[in-house]
Amino acid sequence: MINIDLNLFKNRFTFHQFSKKPTLRQAINNHIVMHNCQISETSSMQKIKLLLLILITILIQTCDSYKRPSKGRFFEVLVVMDSTQHEGVLAKSINESFGGHVMTIPSIENRYDLRFFTIKSQKDLDYAKQAKNVIFASSLNDKNIVADFITSITDPTVQQKIKSDELNAIRLDDKWYTNQWILLLTGSSQEKAAEYLTENQLPIIHSLDERERKRWVYEIYDKGRQTKMEDTLWTDYGWKLGIQHDYAKHIEKDDFVSFRRYMPDNDRWIWVWWQDGFTDLSFLTPEWVNKKRDELLEENIRGKRPQSYIQTEYFRPVESLVKEMNGRYTIQTNGTWRMVEDLMGGPFVNYTVYDEKQNRLYMIEFAQFAPKFPKRNFVRQFEAMALTFDTDSLFSEKKLTVLSD
């Protein structure tokens, strides 16, 4: 018999709407209105009592609104399911989507590390609720503790939509702890929930990808950024990118700059190309991006042998995603590169970004050669670094002013 107090679950809530912490003035006013207090200038004892009550009120409200940070490793997802369903159709769908192989890196690595977990006690539930990335998966009609838990934290209107399969995935980010990605994956049956995930896995997984990238930004710059180099790029070229402490400038031209972090077993590099005068983007397709990339790679990223240079490896999957990054139209391309006339290869991630204010097209590419290391986490690191890319919308005007002076 599972001994869990379900009354602890009965805190109803509206999705994504959380109360804000009151200001000091609001706390004071609320206290005065609630208790109908009248402050007497002649009664110092009343003043002291009132101030103590106000401080207690503020402390209670502050503690109530404070949330501790969530716990868990990067790229790990805790999947909370009943143990009898770990081999079922819904678990299989979760494994194939969140745990599927990353096809755009040369080594065999999963997209996320899944850890299936069963709730057997209140302590288990408390543990699951503090996970950084967590999926609660169950049909609402199942007779298990996960189904009961999903029922307890959703209102009747939402439950009806779940049972009619109008609603199969619910995000509850930061519900119990800060920096959390939470997904309720449910439906009228396991089959319906699994079918929904299979059909909609890309946007659901991308939502977790975006959350992980933002977390990763803080991690990769923990040892510092080269802010002087970034300032120089901003002044000279009208753009900047977060450069880790151990990268060195490698190539610098009027429209191309590269940086390299060289180690014999783990060589990493970044390059940025740009060109002004773009107003019509009808030509901008994934095919154009790959062709332009290969031209730039042949010219600038060459090997040690005279005829060796980097090109895209088209015998492996090359994936393109059109999206918005920091408010700019972007095509993200993930794939594998190879060295012509040499036996080398590795992963790359490219961002082709259009800046409307500058009428300028950018290419930002990150790549790696590390045959002895897993690649997934480094690619995620590159994707997080891309989020720091920024441009100066007034750069052209500043440049004209300098030239006129």
Image (cartoon, helix red, strand yellow):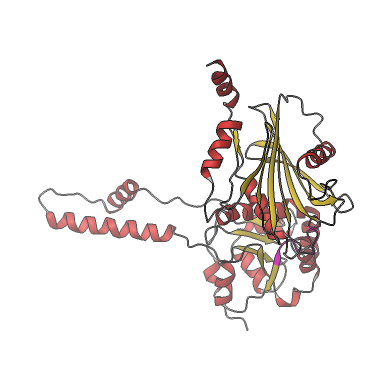
In the displayed structure, 219 sits above or below 117; it is above
Q: Residue furthest top?
A: 404
Does any portion of residue 348 appear in the rendered image?
A: yes
Residue sitting at 63 percent across and 58 percent down? Answer: 156
Identify the residue at the far front of this view: 306
Residue in the foreground of this view, choosing between 83 and 15: 83
- Residue 227 rendering spot, x and y as whole percentages: 52, 43
Q: In the picture provided, is 254 more to the left or to the right than 202? A: left
Horizontally, residue 63 falls left or right of residue 32, namely right
Residue 208 visible in this rendered orientation of the protein: no
Q: Nearer the viewer, residue 212 or 299?
A: 299
Q: Residue at x 62, y 53 (%)?
A: 211
Front in this rendered view, residue 169 or 215: 215
Q: Quadrant of the N terminus?
A: bottom right
Q: Residue furthest bottom?
A: 1
> Measured from the top left, where is residue 269 in percent x and y?
69, 49
Instruction: Say whether residue 106 is magenta.
Output: yes
Query: At 54% across and 19% down in the image, what residue appears?
Result: 401
Asked which quadrant contains residue 82, the reply is: bottom right
State left or right for residue 332 relative to residue 49. right
Q: Is residue 86 above or below residue 132?
A: below
Q: Position of residue 151 (x, y in %)?
A: 63, 65
The reply to whether the magenta stretch includes residue 251 is no
Type of secondary structure dominating the magenta stretch: loop
Q: In this picture, which residue range is highlighted in magenta?
A: 102-113
Marks counted in the figure total 0
